[in-house]
Image (cartoon, helix red, strand yellow):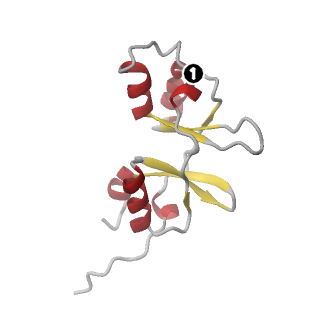
Amino acid sequence: MDTKRSFQSAKDVMTKNIVFVDGMATAKEAVEIMRQKNVEALIVKKRHKQDAYGIVIVHDFIKGVIIAEKTSEEVNIFEIMTKPAISVPANMDVRYVASLLMKVGLRMAPVEENGEYIGMVSLSHLILDNLLF
């Protein structure tokens, strides 16, 4: 019986649905975009060429709006996002993707190929959307 796992990359398990938002958007506007696009994270656009991308996930809204006892209209994305966004290479083995996300305390990350974001990978993708699991 062969129990060796087949190689899978981040690209193999990512979702291709990647959505960008401006850092000046309100939390309310961002959540509406997330609902419309059916995503759990948004990539925050760069302000200029040398800037870094940010990321905002559901956890950030809980922490920065609900727990902080603020309204979604008074909080801008730049206030609650994580920046810089930590990305993973498209060809990275899912074992290392999982290890990296766990070590840095992230739930998801953009997948990068040739200097561009091509998708998103999350810890849940690694299990729930992984046909080899």
Q: Amino acid at mark 1?
A: Asn
Residue positioned 35% across, 50% down in the render: 124
Residue positioned 52% across, 29% down in the render: 36
Say if 76 sits above or below 113 in the image.
Answer: above
User: How many numbered discs, if any?
Assistant: 1
| Residue closer to the observer: 47 or 109 | 47
Q: Quadrant of the N terminus?
A: bottom left
Q: Residue furthest left?
A: 1
Quarter of the image where one finds residue 43 = top right
Residue positioned 57% across, 21% down in the render: 76
Q: Position of residue 97 (x, y in %)?
A: 44, 61
Say if 59 sits above or below 52 in the image.
Answer: above
Relative side of 33 to 57, left or right: right
Residue corresponding to mark 1: 76
Residue positioned 56% across, 63% down in the render: 90
| Residue closer to the observer: 47 or 120 | 47
Relative side of 31 to 53, left or right: left
Q: Position of residue 45 (x, y in %)?
A: 66, 37
